[in-house]
Amino acid sequence: MRRIYGDLHIHIGQAGGKPVKITASRKLDLYSILFVHAPRKGLEMVGVVDAGSPLVSYEITQMLADGVLKELPGGGFLASSGVLLIAGSEVESREGIHSVLYFPTLASIHKFQQYMQSRIKNMSLSTQKARVSLPELINLSIVLDAAFCPAHVFTPHKGIYGAWTARITQELGREAAMIKTIELGLSADTDMADLIAETRGFTFISNSDAHSGDKIGREYNLFRMGDKNFLELKYCLENHNERRILANYGMDPRLGKYHRSYCPACDLIMESPPPVLTCPQCGRQGLVTGVLDRVVSISDYDESRHPVGRPQYNYRVPLRELPGVGPGLEQKLLAFAGSEISLLEEASLDDIKRLAGENVAAMIGKMRLGRLEIIPGGGGRYGKVKKDNCQQ
């Protein structure tokens, strides 16, 4: 078995000189993800979720022809950098919910495009609203031998729990059993998700939803796979054949930009115990509901109930977002460790202290223990790590 770090939700800003994900950096393309950003982070597997765009699939075809990508017998595409590309497509269904389909082959991508051609207004752009329902997407994934995953499920922006329903099983009935995996999103963690009874049947993944190179790998997963290919990943997502996710790594939910409810009229992020669904200052009920507030309001339990074998969720903060770490020090630390994941997960605190000083080493030590002090986010504003975390 192999242990592989992977981030399965990354967006492309442009392909072939044309925009793909409008909100993503135009500097972020497929080549830079596979040959610059993923190796720098320490990721051996990345999911690019814009492959439904013909601009992206054409670029994959060209990279295969040039020999920098190789389509594997078990599915997926191996770059000459050693990074496994899992090609996917994020789709907004009729319900207004975002989901990702991960494809095994180039042929399955083309079949997906043929199906969507009459259901999406502009195929070149990513995450477009499609004239297709969630049950239809789930069944399409089965036909294509793809893996299906509802995206950032708790966020008020297009999340299946955050924006649509309190119970997937009530809405989807039989089709709900076909969902094996859900993506937690930046404002949620395992403890929050396991307050809801039906989630015990899902595998949890934590991904960056990166729209720029520096955000890649801000959340990631450790997979136990027999080999590096699509089929082995699918086994992990289904917790099948001894393949599984060993650990999730992600930002403290308080760092997410939708963690707590927010009143746009008062520009106020709520601080009182959740759930806060009405503004205590102006009485407004139309709040941007925070992930924590939403989860508590629909929860089945007062405390998390983790099923046997649920992987540990480890809080992490990207190196460059730690107070006191500037670009120069970041490069120095990465040159020493080889990648950011190696630094955050494996480097000794003594070595970090020698290179970066006592304060930065103390912060990384606190982060590994989940003890960083956080200013919570909400209303579209990310939370922040308190600067006084530097003190011992």
Image (cartoon, rainbow, N blue to C red):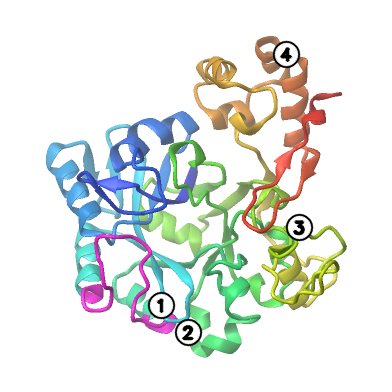
Which residue is under mark 3? Answer: 269
Q: In the structure shown, which secondary structural element does the residue marked by tag 4 occupy?
A: loop
Outermost residue on the left side: it is 65
Mark positioned earlier in the residue sequence (3 or 4): 3
Outermost residue on the top side: it is 354
Q: Residues within 10 Å of mark 4 (few under 14, many from 20)?
A: some
Q: In the structure shown, which secondary structural element does the residue marked by tag 3 occupy?
A: strand
Q: Measured from the top left, where is residue 245 in percent x and y?
A: 56, 53
Name which quarter of the figure residue 159 lies in: bottom right
- In contact (CB < 8 Å): disc 3 and disc 4: no
Q: Is residue 296 left or right of residue 135?
A: right
Residue mark closest to the camera, 3 vs 1: 3
Residue occupying image coordinates x 51% and y 41%: 215
Give how far apart the Cα atoms at labels 3 and 4 are.
34 Å
Which residue is under mark 2? Answer: 175
Mark positioned earlier in the residue sequence (2 or 3): 2
Name the kind of residue labelled 3 in the image.
Answer: Ile
Name the kind of residue labelled 2 in the image.
Answer: Glu
Which residue is under mark 4? Answer: 357
Residue mark closest to the camera, 3 vs 4: 3
Residue occupying image coordinates x 34% and y 76%: 130
Q: Is residue 274 left or right of residue 352?
A: right
Give how far apart the Cα atoms at labels 1 and 4 are.
51 Å
- In contact (CB < 8 Å): disc 2 and disc 3: no
Q: Measured from the top left, where is residue 179 in percent x and y?
A: 50, 74
Instruction: Say if 278 sits above or below 368 in the image.
Output: below
Name the kind of residue labelled 1 in the image.
Answer: Ile
